[in-house]
Amino acid sequence: MEQINRVVGDEEKERDVGVEMKRKVRYTNLFIRLIALILSLAAAIILGLDKQTKVVPITLVSTLPPIKVLATAKYHYLSAFTYFVVANAIACSYGAVSLVLTLANKGSKNGGLAKAIIMLDLIMVAVLASAIGAAAAVGHIGHQGNKHVRWNKVCNVFGRFCNQVIVAVGVSLLGLLLFIFLVMLAVLNVHKKH
């Protein structure tokens, strides 16, 4: 009889450890989703509010003095930056929805919603990666210019604007890494079940 009680007690301890592990994974998942949401929102706001105005001298004829023109740099002047802001706003919105759905799904045995969230996490990884790549490419041209096509660098004039672009791309990259980590957690969770 003592042997049976010991076996039953061990099974209960294993079940309690399994439940505790699932709870920790769920809370970790929720925390990561919240941080990814915040980072995506921050990246969209940083670049969305980025604006710098400078007086730029333009030489029309080499024999005349340069004309001073007021020039402004805004995110929506470049489609790659607009795409970046919109992609991060979408990732932020999705992060909020997925957070609510994950909370609502915590006691459910329905795997369909969990699978849909994983698929949407993958889509967010793709969207954010493409937006970060586009913004980084345009930012690089802003810093370095391109002599082959005669594009001058602009970050020597609009330094603060370019620095905020770098910060926004970095913050968004951290959000992207968290979405990748969420996908990795889901894959590990599926692997443990099978």
Image (cartoon, grey):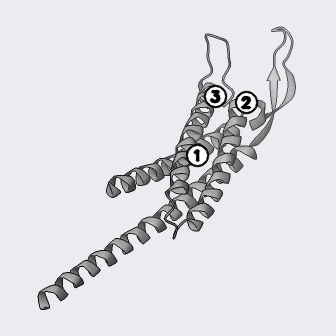
Q: Using the image, determine if residue 165 lies above or below residue 5.
A: above
Q: Quadrant of the C terminus?
A: bottom left
Choose top left, top right, bottom left or bottom right for residue 142: top right
Instruction: Kindly identify which residue carries mark 1.
Output: 172
Direction from residue 20 to residue 66 in the image, left or right: right
Whether tag 1 and tag 2 are in contact, CB under 8 A, the answer is no
Which quadrant of the figure has residue 33? bottom right
Residue assigned mark 3: 138
Position of residue 176 measured from the top left corner of the image (x, y, whole percent): 53, 46
In space, the residues marked 3 and 1 are separated at their CA atoms by 15 Å
Residue at which label 2 appears: 79
Q: Secondary structure at mark 2?
A: helix
Going from N to C along the chain, the mark reached first, 3 or 1, is 3
Task: Answer whether labels 2 and 3 touch (C-beta < 8 Å).
Answer: no
* Tag 3 secondary structure: helix
Q: Is residue 170 visible?
A: no
